[in-house]
Image (tube, rainbow, N blue to C red):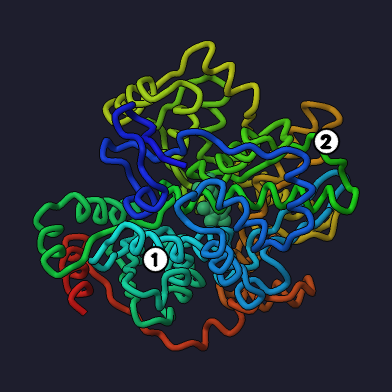
Amino acid sequence: MEYKSTRSKNVSGVSSAFAIKSGLAPDGGLYMPERLPHIDEKTLHALSGMTYPERAAEILSMFLSDYTKEELLKDCRAAYSEDNFPGGATQIVNFAPDMYSLELWHGPTCAFKDMALQIMPRLLSSALRKTGEKRTALILVATSGDTGKAALEGYKNTDRIKIQVFYPENGVSRVQKLQMATQTGDNVDVCAIKGNFDDAQTGVKRIFSDASVRAELDAQGVFLSSANSINWGRLAPQIVYYISAYCDLAAPGKIKYGDEIDVCVPTGNFGNIFAAYIANLMGLPIGHLICASNKNNILTDFLSTGVYDRNRDFYTTISPSMDILISSNLERLLYLICGPEATGKYMKELAEKGRYEISGEDFAKIKEKFIGYFADEDKTKSTIKATYEKHGYLIDPHTAVAVSAAEDFIKDKGKSAPIIIASTASPYKFAKDVYSALTGKSAKGDLEALGELSAMTGVEIPGPLRGIGDRKIRFDKVTDPVGMADMVMSFAKK
Ligand SMILES: *Cc1c(COP(=O)(O)O)cnc(C)c1O
């Protein structure tokens, strides 16, 4: 399988190892497979008899043809081990009639990003070998909370790879800050930024495009790489769990092989929902893809009007991982629907005017499959409360946005097919907001909320968040955005 760019016909024939190593195509586009592999009912039957790591290796091998099956199986077994994901990599909870919550947060950092970031470092390690790369990779991450910790856990103690994470000093929750500040591993570094997430992100982008920094690093045998969801190595592992979830419903007869299901995904950068779309194009019977947004509802507007317009207010919400105005992976959908030339044109308009509009037939094609809903802050909170009171099921704010969208969808359509809702974070990762949604009172503090929520609901606190306040702080550096390049240089030398 070879890869090509979403933006022009000239970048093609790229190996999967090279696409994973470089992240972004040289024309600024994202890498996509040149064609999509096909699965049918026979494949689904066969996958049903396998464990999650075996299913993952099977599906990844369809996309990563320059990796051997044995390699992939070894990596998947290590990534999705019982140690990393106690009780299973994914767990499905049938919390209401025809509503299945696909819990993707049983990994080391209690958010779904572990599903990709536990396997991706292994894929990158092999990619360095396969492409004859002699230098060390330095992964730079700007994070608003979840990605940074998941990347640190995934990349810690990986040979010939270092990772450095920057987060906004006052822009992450106490739990998220402690998760990063107490990170273990000998190839990791964490630094707070005086500023907001945009300052951290802009700082990282500036370092990536600074030729003198790159040359200096190169002289030391180091090159920069990234871990965010524009990298195909992060997207491919996300296709697996939708196919796997279908098998988990079909095998015990909850659905019949061939039955259509709907899928609802709380969406920010459009990576997770796009993975479900790929599964569908491969042959997984999915009727509708429900795109759930919070108050930053740019995608809801896009899916109802065809106009993508980022010239709007930005809101900070209780589902912070979806507070995004530029959904990078939407570019991959545009590419599949409109082709590389039109995609290049739309992306140029987005960069220059912050806006683009897609035309009649292309828009109709998107609407055949995708439908968007959003939940504002009050709706998110009332959904957390109602889901707990009606169904006895405790959910985090991101999952609540999706549950609200799924309920809206059922209301609009009348009776629907079974819906798989991607549950993207443990409620304990956002315990303070969940506690206040349930009780109308505020908890004493972020850490106290963990205990209060658990005492109230009887739901256990996940292992990785237990006793987080007692762990040793390893990283307490803070820098101005201008000091970031120096931080990178000195960490690279270590
Ligand atoms: C990253 C994240 C999302 C959004 O996923 P995208 O792939 O960016 O659309 C949703 N929920 C949680 C908890 C996340 O960490």
Check residue 319 in the rendering and tell me which mark sits there, or answer none. none
Q: Residue at x 73, y 39 (%)?
A: 406
Q: Quadrant of the C terminus?
A: bottom left
Image location of residue 290, percent across then percent down: 66, 35
Q: Is residue 294 above or below residue 223?
A: above
Residue furthest out toward the top: 360
Choose between 467 and 204: the one closer to the eye: 204
Q: Do callouts 2 and 1 mark residues in contact (Cβ within 8 Å)?
A: no
| Amino acid marked by disc 2 | Asp
Find out if the beta carbon at label 1 lies less than 8 Å from the nearest ligand 1 atom: no
Q: Using a 10 Å C-alpha cutoff, classify the residue at mark 1 as few (fewer than 14 neighbours), some (14 to 19) or many (20 or more).
A: many
- Disc 2 from disc 1: Cα separation: 39 Å
Choose between 153 and 64: the one closer to the eye: 64
- Sooner in the amino-acid sequence: mark 2 or mark 1: 1
Choose between 384 and 209: the one closer to the eye: 209
- Residue 156 seen in this snapshot: yes
Q: Under tag 2, what secondary structure?
A: loop
Q: Using a 10 Å C-alpha cutoff, classify the residue at mark 2 as few (fewer than 14 neighbours), some (14 to 19) or many (20 or more).
A: some
Q: Residue at x 26, y 56 (%)?
A: 204
In front: label 2 or label 1: 1
Residue annotated with mark 1? 125
Image location of residue 221, percent across then percent down: 18, 68
Locate residue 461 relative to residue 272 in the image: left or right.
right
Residue annotated with mark 2? 259
| Amino acid marked by disc 1 | Ser
Choose between 203 and 22: the one closer to the eye: 22
Q: Residue at x 44, y 28 (%)?
A: 335
Q: Is residue 81 above or below residue 272?
A: below
The number of discs equals: 2
Q: Residue at x 72, y 46 (%)?
A: 403
Q: Under tag 1, what secondary structure?
A: helix
